[in-house]
Image (cartoon, coloured by chain):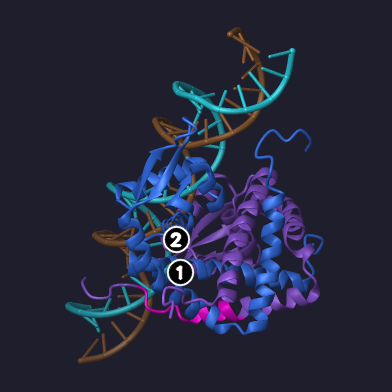
Chain colours: A blue, B purple, C cyan, D brown
Amino acid sequence: MGMTESLDSTRGAAWRAYIEASQRLFTQLEEDLRVDSDLSFADYHVLVLLSEAPGQRLRMGELASRLIFSPSRLTYQVSSMQRRGLVSKEPCPDDRRGSEAVLTAAGLLALREAAPHHLASVRTHLMDDLDDAEVACLTRIFDRLGERLRASRVSSATPTAR
Amino acid sequence: MGMTESLDSTRGAAWRAYIEASQRLFTQLEEDLRVDSDLSFADYHVLVLLSEAPGQRLRMGELASRLIFSPSRLTYQVSSMQRRGLVSKEPCPDDRRGSEAVLTAAGLLALREAAPHHLASVRTHLMDDLDDAEVACLTRIFDRLGERLRASRVSSATPTAR
DNA sequence: CAGGTGTTGTTCAAAGCTGCACGATTTGCT
DNA sequence: AGCAAATCGTGCAGCTTTGAACAACACCTG
């Protein structure tokens, strides 16, 4: 074979390194988070987004799109966190279809306790090992990538042309 | 002060960009793979690893560690692929505990058909947008990261009780 | 060779996730 | 107003993933 390689060797190597290391990193971070805060990565991210939102509340749809979660996944995720008292759910005042997730006091506390450990984890596993040039490069690459992917993900269904 | 922020703003931004874009990228690649080859990312990766292995076969444990899969997850993954005829499973000749996953003709064919699409997907979503310096930077960062994470993952479980 | 100690991979129950269909709106068009 | 189409979130069935317990075997020591 050989025609199957449509990535030149340099980019192929970059791709493999990126995929493998990222996989390992996410696994490691998730485990750390679980061990010293008893939260999943998803839990943590929900808490962060809600804590930064005005009124510490967000519409389900908004939350889902920021988390890159399917609607049904978010419903499940939020119910789970609700059972554990980390968030509550309220009907949306101006749109009776919708509902919003609201951070509870317990949720905020959990975040405050988890954050230092998690951020330390990010530092020791990734950031401490990067010099400033590398950080800049990382930012440049992934900012651009994120922007591009965000743009190309508009029509979720019924693509007229394909 | 500000002990809640243990990441300086530069690194915080890098971290967020990396996480979000990676999430989006993986989601997108998985969807592409599913749409035009009816394979999951895990399926694809298994096929690649087996196709590159001598005899197109690998011990379960070896495969698991390369995929960064838990043993039970790999058992499930391989059974699933076995049901679909992509791989088969044979007892290991020299160690009667173990077994090895073997690529079937159908599996190899599936890989050959999927690879061009998948690689094109990787190119259009990521690689085509990076210049050579960025590729080099990506490689350098994630090679080092992967190496470091591979090393620091030794003790498995059973901290105290058993 | 007996006996303990590690490995290897599987099994099982519980939890998580996906895609789809649905009920309940809201919105746009005429 | 009246009605079709789009939007919002949930419910559900089925698949995937996890973690712990396990059985089968290998290895090592005496």
In the rendered structure, find residue A41 and report the number of the disc placed on it: 2
Q: Residue at x 80, y 75 (%)?
A: B132
Neighbours of disc 2 within 10 Å: few (<14), some (14-19), many (20+): some
Depth check, front residue: A1 or D25: A1
Distance of label 1 from label 2 (alpha carbons): 8 Å
In the rendered structure, find residue A29 and report the number of the disc placed on it: 1
Q: Is residue B79 magenta?
A: no
Q: Amino acid at mark 2?
A: Phe
Q: Secondary structure at mark 1?
A: helix
Q: Are marks 1 and 2 in contact (CB under 8 Å)?
A: yes
Farthest residue to the right: give it.
A3
Q: Is residue B149 magenta?
A: yes
Which residues, given as a range, are shown in magenta? B144-156
Q: Is residue B98 left or right of residue A9?
A: left
Q: Are marks 1 and 2 on the same chain?
A: yes
Depth check, front residue: B69 or A158: A158
- Residue A75 visible from this viewpoint: yes
Residue B84, position in %: x, y?
57, 45
